[in-house]
Amino acid sequence: MSDRYDFLCFSRLFASLPATAASTDAPSAPAARRVLQSAGGLLLLLFGPIVVFGVPPAVPESSGILLLQDDFERDEADPEKEDVGNGWGTNSKTRAQGQKQVDLDGGAMHITRAEVADHGVSVHHDLAFRNGTIQLRFKLGPKDDLGINIADMQEKSVHAGHLCMTRIRLDKVELKDLKTGVMNLETRKQRLAGSLTPAMEKQIATRTKTFKVHLTPDEWHQLSVQIDGDTMRVTIDDMLVGTFQSPGIAHPTKRRLRLAVNRSAWIDDVSVWKQ
């Protein structure tokens, strides 16, 4: 996912190799792992929780108040109709002429944008928190993407309540402050009119931070998005992708979680914790 991730993969590969027959003094793989672990423990003792050999500190388990948990282990009453259940809503009626875009399939949620849709699919759930953690599993195809969009429908300074967002593709992850960026009403108005000044475009650019990743297509990945004050922290498969600090993230009350899909995505095991 980064230079640190690539180095971690290399170190794991190195530790897994057997000793060569030509060098009887070469350490065995278990011995090599013990050396790495001992070195990591020594550095931890001396310097505290730091990254050793490219390995980020362990991601702490979620704590606080559980606001939402869903494993999608259920079926629709009518398979031909969209019925996610458990408090979830979608924009299929208003954006896809009522066509079904969300399917409960094999204990997971499969989201697919309809051909007639004039907007990406939004699967939303209302809840309220200031600081919290969103966790879920996801699976994307080669051209797919998934947005974890946080909104407040009572906030009138932005379009459609947009506050902040994590957008995931197989090759990159974008962390966005939408409230003070592209979804601010005045900024959006000038952007659509093509009248943004160079200074405004420069400011908008500072409201997004992009991180390169290398995710395997059509396989399940574990995601965690943590919001603490004005900072958003994202991990995938227990590896730190990146952090982003921006004023819009600190919006006092986040009231809606949106799962935004422009093409297709699989989602499972969603949980939201309030800190």
Image: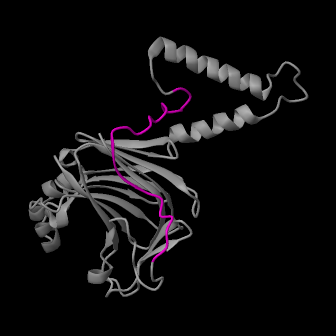
**Residue at the spot 24% in from the left edge and 49% down from the top edge:** 206
**Colouring:** one colour
Which residue: 26% across, 82% down? Answer: 94
Furthest residue in direction front, as rendered = 77
In percent of width and height, residue 170 lies at 50, 59
Looking at the image, residue 269 lies above or below residue 246: below
Q: Is residue 262 above or below residue 46?
A: below
Answer left or right for 30 relative to 76.
Answer: right
- Is residue 213 visible in the rendered structure shown here? no
Q: Nearer the viewer, residue 131 or 247?
A: 131
Is residue 236 visible to the viewer in this orientation of the structure?
yes
Q: Is residue 11 left or right of residue 61?
A: right
Tell whether 171 sits left or right of 147. right
Determine whether 10 is above or below 108 in the image: above
Q: For the C terminus, which image quadrant? A: top left
Q: In this picture, is 52 found above or below 152?
A: above
For the point 50% across and 13% down, the residue is 45
Q: How many marks?
A: 0
Q: Out of 81 and 147, give the one closest to the viewer.
A: 81
With 131 as the anchor, is 32 left or right in this view?
Answer: right
Query: Is residue 73 one of those drawn in magenta?
Result: yes
Coordinates of residue 3 in the picture (x, y in percent): 52, 40
Give coordinates of residue 6: x percent, y percent.
Answer: 57, 41
As rendered, which of 48 and 134 lies closer to the eye?
134
Q: Main secondary structure of the magenta part?
A: loop
Q: Position of residue 81 (x, y in %)?
A: 41, 84
Check residue 223 for magenta coloring. no
User: What is the magenta range?
Assistant: 52-76
